[in-house]
């Protein structure tokens, strides 16, 4: 292995999870170099230019890939994020780097005012954060990072340190965010779900009066084409929702926007399974968490499954009705081990059918219905394919015995990641790079796929069901 490969794959100087004597592919070296370039000393930025702070679910995905290169750095990534947790249990979606200029990203710390507006909710005083959250991938990430080097994890007390924080995070979601009263978690802002600009939000967002365009400056347009980004009207609504939430002291339950989302809840369920594994490793009772994951799966099916659509749909809690848009979020529950078999078969058919085209018209699953009126192959979450959602679906296919389709999707992800220079997202038909390149989770999940596949059916999703991997 040459010096360039050693630098990219050693990062902190610890022995890498790969066998150093083995052949390291150029794609591995390139992916590791992206993570090295984004490292700040305590965490990894998704993109130096476009996203110069620490993002919550980005860091979870980054840690999942980083564990193959440096388990110590992967632990540090999650330690840094959870150190910014609020006293009410929420993990904020952004942890701001104070050395970054305020005008480098909007909304900036002076917009969120976390230490003052969030005082009642227990926002930390020593670090500035946003006041909203992102999908709860964290327990799954913690468990997988532990499995990468159990000896190091035990020596550093990693799981013992993470478990109470993760338990508080899930408690916040389950107790404070069951706004529909049916046992599922609601998001109170499109940014919380992670798929910010999905057409699934158009109907509930239409009730929101946008903030005046002169009241904010969009830093994202300095680094990306306006045709690829949310419109000014949508962005004005995002700003209004966030400022209203802030002005209520980040209290939950009274805002105009409340949506039960399939992917957000499926990731919470997957993380409940992971928390059960963590509890068992620590010698604590785990059966209650297993049972909770199964109850949440039943609630997900009862409230969000739509047989006519062949998939899960979002539910507008304020309107009390499903949102009739097919987004990739409605396929993500495929990653759940206790999902009924007939539903998993239907999800696979929908994924491979005309609405998403996997294996036919598309090589990766798009973020939105190919036949939908709002489909746009380049605009943020309104059609482009993303590596993180496809990574989750690859694991779901593998979990439920669809090995051939999983292998094909894995191959498509790896080819696209390399050919697009680890793009933030891509055109689902042509794989043309969109957004920024050198994107953190694209590189990290590329490393994860390169490390685990195709020998056997072990992956991040099956690790929560059984059969630990190292």
Image: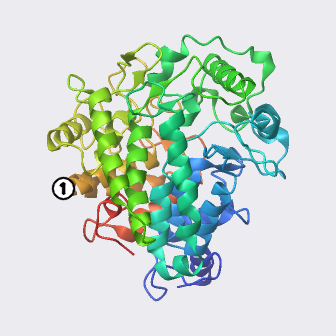
Q: Position of residue 303 (x, y in %)?
A: 31, 27
State the residue at coordinates (84%, 53%): 99
- Residue at the left extreme, as displayed: 342
- Residue at the bottom extreme, as displayed: 21
State the residue at coordinates (75%, 13%): 212
Q: From where the camera sits, is residue 418 visible?
A: no
Q: Nearer the viewer, residue 322 or 232?
A: 322
467 over 439 or under it: above or below? below
Q: Position of residue 132 (x, y in %)?
A: 63, 36
Q: Is residue 272 left or right of residue 187?
A: left
368 over 145 or under it: above or below? above
Q: Nearer the viewer, residue 9 or 393?
A: 393
Q: Nearer the viewer, residue 466 or 428?
A: 466
Give the quadrant of residue 92: top right
Q: How is the image coloured?
A: rainbow
Q: Quadrant of the C terminus?
A: bottom left
Q: How many other residues sit within 10 Å of disc 1, few (<14), some (14-19) or many (≥20)? A: few
Give the quadrant of residue 261: top left
Q: Position of residue 285 (x, y in %)?
A: 39, 63
Q: Which residue is mark 1?
A: 401
Q: Position of residue 422 (x, y in %)?
A: 53, 54
250 over 407 or under it: above or below? above
Give the quadrant of residue 374: top left
Q: From where the camera sits, is residue 188 visible?
A: yes
SS for tag 1?
Answer: loop
């Amino acid at each position: 292995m040459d010096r360039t490969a050693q630098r990219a794959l050693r990062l902190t100087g610890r022995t890498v999870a790969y066998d150093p004597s083995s052949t390291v592919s150029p794609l591995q070296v390139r992916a590791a170099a992206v993570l090295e370039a984004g490292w700040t000393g305590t965490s990894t930025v998704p993109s130096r230019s476009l996203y110069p702070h620490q993002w919550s679910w980005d860091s979870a995905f980054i840690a999942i890939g980083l564990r193959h290169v440096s388990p110590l750095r992967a632990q540090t990534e999650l330690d840094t994020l959870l150190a910014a947790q609020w006293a009410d249990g929420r993990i904020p979606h952004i942890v701001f780097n104070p050395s970054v200029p305020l005008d480098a990203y909007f909304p900036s710390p002076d917009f969120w005012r976390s230490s003052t507006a969030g005082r009642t909710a227990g926002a930390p005083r020593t670090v500035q954060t946003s006041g909203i959250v992102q999908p709860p991938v964290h327990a799954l990430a913690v468990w997988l990072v532990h499995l990468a080097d159990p000896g190091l994890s035990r020596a550093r007390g990693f799981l013992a340190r993470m478990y109470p924080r993760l338990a508080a995070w899930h408690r916040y979601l389950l107790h404070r965010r069951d706004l529909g009263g049916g046992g599922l978690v609601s998001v109170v802002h499109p940014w919380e779900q992670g798929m910010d600009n999905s057409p699934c939000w158009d109907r509930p967002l239409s009730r929101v009066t946008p903030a005046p365009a002169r009241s904010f400056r969009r830093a994202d347009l300095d680094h990306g084409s306006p045709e690829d980004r949310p419109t000014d009207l949508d962005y004005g609504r995002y700003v209004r929702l966030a400022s209203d939430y802030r002005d209520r002291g980040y209290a939950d339950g009274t805002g105009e926007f409340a949506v039960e989302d399939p992917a957000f809840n499926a990731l919470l369920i997957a993380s409940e399974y992971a928390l059960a594994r963590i509890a068992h490793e620590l010698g604590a009772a785990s059966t209650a968490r297993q049972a909770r994951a199964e109850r949440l799966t039943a609630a997900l099916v009862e409230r969000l499954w739509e047989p006519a659509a062949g998939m899960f749909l979002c539910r507008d809690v304020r309107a009390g009705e499903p949102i009739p848009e097919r987004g990739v979020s409605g396929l993500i529950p495929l990653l759940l081990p206790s999902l009924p078999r007939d539903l998993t078969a239907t999800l696979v058919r929908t994924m491979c059918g005309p609405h998403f085209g996997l294996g036919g018209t598309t090589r990766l699953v798009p973020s939105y219905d190919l036949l939908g009126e709002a489909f746009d192959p380049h605009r943020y979450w309104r059609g482009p394919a993303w590596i993180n959602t496809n990574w989750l679906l690859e694991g779901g296919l593998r979990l439920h015995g669809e090995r051939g389709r999983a292998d094909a999707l894995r191959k498509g992800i790896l080819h696209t990641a390399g050919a697009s220079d680890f793009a933030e997202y891509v055109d689902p038909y042509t794989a043309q790079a969109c957004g920024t390149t050198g994107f953190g989770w694209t590189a990290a999940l590329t490393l994860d796929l390169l490390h685990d596949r195709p020998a056997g059916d072990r992956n991040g999703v099956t690790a929560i069901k059984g059969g630990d991997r190292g």
